Image (cartoon, helix red, strand yellow):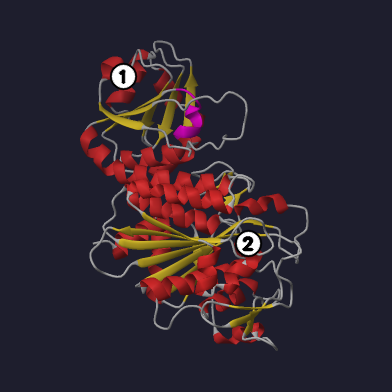
Amino acid sequence: MTTPAEIQFKDVDLDVVATAVGKLAVFVDNDGKLDLGARKVNTLTRKALSRFLESEQFEKMSAGDVSQIAYPAGLAAEAVIVTKLSRRPSSQEARKAGAQLAKAQGDADLTVLAGSIARADEIALGLALRGYKFDTHKTAEKMPIGAVSFMVAKPEDVAKTAAPMAAIAEGVFFTRDLTNEPANVLTTDDFAARLAAMHELGLEVEILEEDDLERLGMGSLLCVGQGSDSPSKVVVMSWNGGGDEAPFALVGKGVVFDTGGISLKTAAGMEDMTMDMGGAGVVAGVMRTLALRKAKANVVGLVGLVENMPSGNAVRPGDVVKSMKGDTIEVINTDAEGRLVLADVMWYAQERFKPVGMINLATLTGAILVALGHENAGVFSNSDDLSESFIKAASLEGEGAWRMPMGKAYDAMLKSRIADMKNIGGRVAGSITAAQFLQRFVKEDLPWCHLDIAGVASVKAETGLAPAGATGWGVMALNRLIADKYEA
């Protein structure tokens, strides 16, 4: 997998500033005040830094913005990266500064003269996250990531607080890699194998094959993959870092490619459907993070892995399938397949693990993208407490989430003449009726959230902490939710 840059934290040693190769980064607050490291650079460059701080360019910079002084006299470094940041930045300002440093770094080594600036660990996290590159399938020679070292006043303390953030970065990278992979590489078999390999981190991993799913009665999930040569699977990942309490459950939709099935999608843009396993990717990234940082919580992550293909054996519009719960479903549109997968996996999670709460994630509807764009995931819930806790965690991590309405009035749109329900309610309120469908597979009194991440899992343009492509949205928010609400 793609690994984040290894960041070292060292004591401040101004004697090596003149000979440091690659690029040097300094921090200057809004009023242009220089710390010890910046003053050293200013002296060595014959006050080139002071002259820059008097420029209109510096005046126009916002908190976290950077600018470069190329090939400065008096230094071996090829550039000085000037970062405008207060001595006590907010978490988001610090991460933004780190992300901008990563963009400015390129492939060069980077020495960051952080001194005693607050939130150096958050700056390092932003740098690690924005330094992601998915070039696995490019044949050109790949440039190694430059070494990164932070010179800080108390390196042991900063390294200690940065360690769990490094686990978060690795979890995000794992999610991004999975979501970016093409479907001929990330088959259901390959996906399951990558998850199984996490047993080395201390996770318990179990793979349920099609025979197991048939015995369990998962007719809803199995119908989605029956037109594909790739076998359908459910992977269960358990992290038992807490006491004897019941776990919190995360459930992810893992459609490794979605043609729409017999209700075939249009050709334009279908190549993007490699990301339709984004929900399962987030669950996997969260479980990796929890294991790496040795979270003191019990969490189970379950993902349904299928491929939705048209063939002579594919499920047809008008077919009726039976879920593990026992409810029958009339399949009106085979492209509304994610909810069929989630229904069985959610029911299985509740039957087997009796969780204290459950969150499912899915790139479920185009309607949520119309409603919220690429800025926010849709949050649907039967619990004010759980939804508010998640939205707070997402806000603190800078991951957009917005609560959407639910209500019994929408259930009428799912009524079927020949079965217990239809799998789709039509164009109107498409995201809400999808959530209403899923709620039928949530047991009474279980706190539950459905996160529709169709607009945020993968995007065409770069975001603050990620290049274009898979974002890894949700790993940080869910990790914080577990830490704040369920960790001992």
Looking at the image, which residue is at 50% across and 33% down?
103
Q: Which residues are magenta?
A: 101-108
Residue ID at (68%, 86%):
416
Q: Position of residue 156 (x, y in %)?
A: 21, 35
In the image, what residue occupies the spot 71% across and 62% down?
A: 260
Mark 1: amino acid: Lys
Q: Examine the image and state in which quarter residue 266 appears.
A: bottom right
Q: Secondary structure at mark 2?
A: helix
Measure the alpha-carbon separation of dots 1 and 2: 50 Å
Residue 378 visible? The answer is no
Q: Give amino acid for label 2.
A: Leu
Residue 487 visible in the shown view: yes
Q: Which residue is the site of mark 1?
A: 40
Compared to residue 424, the image places residue 135 above or below, namely: above
Picture coordinates of residue 319, whole percent (x, y): 71, 77
- Camera-nearest residue between 107 and 183: 183
How packed is label 1: few (under 14 Cα within 10 Å), some, or many (20 or more)?
some
Is 125 left or right of 323, judged from the image as shown? left
What residue occupies the far top of the structure in this picture?
A: 74
Residue receiving disc 2 = 369
Quadrant placement of the C terminus: bottom left
Residue depth check, mark 1 versus mark 2: number of the one nearer the observer = 2
Q: Nearer the viewer, residue 283 or 447?
A: 283
Q: The residue tagged with tag 1: helix, strand or loop? A: helix
Residue 305, given in percent of the width and then of the height, sits at: 55, 59
Front position in the image: 165 or 401: 165
Check the image and report above or below for 215 versus 42.
below
Q: In the picture provided, is 176 more to the left or to the right than 205? A: right
Tell me if residue 279 is in the magenta stretch: no
Contact between labelled residues 2 and 1, with CB atoms less than 8 Å apart: no
